[in-house]
Image (cartoon, rainbow, N blue to C red):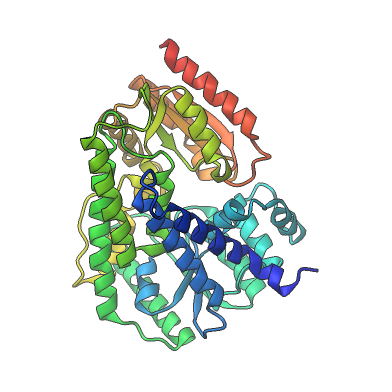
Amino acid sequence: MIGSEEKKSRIKTIVRACRLIARMSKGRPEVLESHRIYYQMLADYYDRLLNAQEEGEFVAAHTIFFPVEILYAMDIVPMHTELTAWMTALFSGSYADLLSTSAEVGLAPEICSPYRVLTGALAAGCLPRPNVMLWSNLICDNSAKGGEPVMDMSGCSGFFLDCPFQQTDYENRYLKEELEDMIYFLEKQSGRKMNWDKLSDNIAQSDRQIELYRKINELRQTVPSPFPPQDFLKLFTVDCFFAGQPEATNYLETFHQELLETIRDGRGMASPERFRVMSIGMPPVLLLGAIEKVSLEYGAVSVADPFFCNWGEGRLDPQKPLDSVMKKISMHPVMVMYGPLDERLLDMLINCAKQHKIDGTINYAHVGCKQGAATIKIVKDVLNEIDVPMLILDCDIIDTTIAPEEEIREKLRQFFELLEDR
């Protein structure tokens, strides 16, 4: 039987770990200031979530790619479901018991592991129970079904945001009505009114943040690459957790300036940089250090993560906040994977490979992602046409038993040796 303190320990572990990293980073010249800012942001995010119930806060759990600008404008505490599952595994180093618990409550092993970890953690009482659940069809079946078990285990109500595949006038009107209905639902459930001025401020911040994402992604085209390979996960997390918040703008501005200084000094992540790699999909989060280590042994640097960093064109208008929320959804890099496969995905990959001078691509084929798996051959064929080989690395985002560290190391070595022989 899990005691109440042990139930809370998963979130407490995240808070303690992030605070420790932030504190140890301060004052060390070899550590980027953006690194410290990032971990302090994470510590504050989870500390607020940890204490939300005692302080009378209203918590909304939400799935990936959700417009958190709306939640912050209503002073609602967000809890990102998938990333909280990742963070729980990453900082506690423990996930096997949660996967086992999820199996006991009926989740099949073929289901995406973040959802299984999340379900196991809620069933075991290791995560706070939200007041409401918000989920959508962005961008996969796992997400579309992810809200129901959370509602069942938490005893809360929920709202499903139905996002159309296209952006015609009719579909945009439909999505805007969906957002308005969701805001009404949140007002009714939380007793908090939408602060439209605050939402406009959040949209202005998000617009600035997207511009910074674009500038950072453009700097990754520099040879040698100034970009720390694991920092794509920070960029992704910052938008998922803190979109529209001034601390996210501060982080991105700091990181952008650090990259400019690295380029000015002529420094790169690998010495020498021999291979420039494009990464498709999410690598195993518990093995990021091992992946970077073996990559740098061969002078290979990941310089492009198109599904996380390659934001589309357009600007957000603070005077039209809901229209801008819809615009941002359509601009998100991963939206090329939403709906029927078309030329958007293939053109983006080809352009990204050319702009970043890619020598090879690693496709992290997460076994729980049926959508990504369905595109593997098409993506490999189109990259072969421009002479960019692709390694298909079967793995799992969280569960390292699917593809153990040594197996991944060996496949990466073989791929980099193939690039050497070209």
Residue 191 versus residue 198 in the image, above or below: below
The residue at 41%/86% (across/down) is: 192
Write down the quadrant of residue 319 in the picture: bottom left
Q: Is residue 314 left or right of residue 177?
A: left
The image quadrant that residue 40 belongs to is bottom left
Instruction: Give the answer, above or below, for where 154 lies relative to 97.
Output: below
Q: Position of residue 195 (x, y in %)?
A: 31, 82
239 left or right, relative to 412: left
- Which image quadrant: the C terminus? top left
Quadrant in the rendering for residue 117: bottom right
Residue 2 lies, in percent from the top left, at 76, 68
Q: Position of residue 90 (x, y in %)?
A: 58, 51
Res. 98 in view = yes
For the N terminus, the image quarter is bottom right
Residue for point 56% across, 78% down: 157
Residue visible at 58% across and 44% down in the picture: 286
Q: Is residue 275 left or right of residue 121?
A: left
Number of marks? 0
The single residue placed furthest to the bottom in the displayed view is 191
